[in-house]
Image: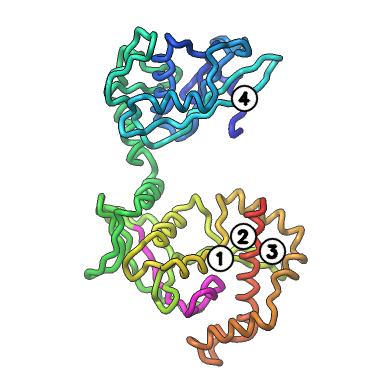
Amino acid sequence: MNYDINELLNTPEDEYHDFKAQWYSQSDKAELIKDIFSFVNTSHHKDCYLIIGVDDDHNIVGIENDENRLNTQKLTDFLHSLPIANSHTPKVKVTSVTIEDHLIDIIIIKDTVDVPVYLDEDKRPKKCNAVIHAGQIFARENDTNTSTKESASDYLAERLWKKRFGLDLPIQQQYKVKLQDTANWEYFETDKVGFLYNVDPDYCMFLEDDGENRYKVESYALGQFRARMDWQKLILKYRNRTIAEFLVVFLDGARFMTLTPNLGAIEPLSETPLTFQYFIADSLEFSVEKLFLSMKQGPTAPDGFQKLNLLQRIVIFDNGKQMKQVQKELSDKKEYIKNQCTPSQEEIDQCHSLLSLDFNSKEREIQQSNLKHMCQEANVSQFIIRYLKSK
């Protein structure tokens, strides 16, 4: 569970939770629709909870003898039976807990940006007097739902439409929403080179030359047919405003492009840290990377082999918290990991053969110490990837 039931029970009703003494009877099904739709139609970005078996004064009365109880499947089937516009059926889950010798049910209403949710034709549930009308929008504000006889105010409806299109978010979050719409991004070459969001050209990313003297190969390039890399900068623009700037590299003989991952380490402050390459999945950076990896056409698009071999050498953490936890867990196993990830002479020789296609013997990239370091770094990244899959 990602909520604290005791905290909810001791918190006044608000935009996130509501108390019901009992389940909805057949004649109250219109109220059930209204209450669930109201919690879906909230302008925040968190799950909501209908807590059944608790009265308005927070007294736990229980539902153990309630003949109207629904489980997740039955409630989901009921919602699927409704004529919901655009088939945006709310996602719900029913879970039960025992408190003070009473059983209470909790309907978890999952957060979504597919709002507002409403019906596209009138619906009178069986044995109900109330009718839910087509286009009628129910919304939750503070601790109050829209009445079944009314529709949400223009103000509340506007907030929901803004949520749907990401207009309620900070500009970096809005950028992430646009980047998820991968089908509408297009590579272009005019006086500049970059990527344009066709739906809203205010969102545009430009490629620029990078003048720094950087290594021409990194550990995540070792799985490609050609390992030499060419660096550029990617500038994320909203109108004339720069939102972010990332480094990108062209890999495999400049056949595809990827953002450069971040460099992490197990025991980073020690004299011999074990380095690895990583992305954070919930970052703006990785949203850009997912767009590039999803592209099917254009000079920057990878094929399946290139993408597979790239991601075999880059760790993808869910978030920064997970990364710190894994680093902490693995620090106790550092010597074991080092023994497991120290490259064999055969690995180093294979790396040398690959790099010799693009580098001469005097260049720093092909020196023995660098070859060993890159092979070990790739092995550590692969070790962590396996570790995450095993958890």
Mark 4 vs mark 2: in front? 2
Q: Quadrant of residue 389?
A: bottom right
| The disc label shown at residue 5, or none | 4
Q: At label 2, which amino acid type do we have?
A: Ile
Q: CB of mark 2 within 8 Å of CB of mark 1?
A: yes
Q: Earlier in the sequence, mark 3 or mark 4?
A: 4
Residue 385 numbered mark, or none = 2
Of circles 3 and 4, which is in front? 4
Distance Cα–Cα, label 2 vs label 1: 8 Å
Pick the residue in front: 350 or 163.
350
Circle nearer the viewer, 3 or 2: 2
- Circle 4: element type: helix
Residue drawn at the location 51% of the way across and 28% of the way down: 73
Question: Residue 77 occupies which quadrant of the picture?
Answer: top left
Residue that label 1 marks: 312
Cα separation, mark 4 vs mark 2, equals 34 Å
Q: Position of residue 358 (x, y in %)?
A: 48, 86
User: According to the image, label 3 marks what residue?
Assistant: 269
Relative image position of residue 10 (x, y in whole percent): 61, 19
Which corner quadrant holds the N terminus? Answer: top right
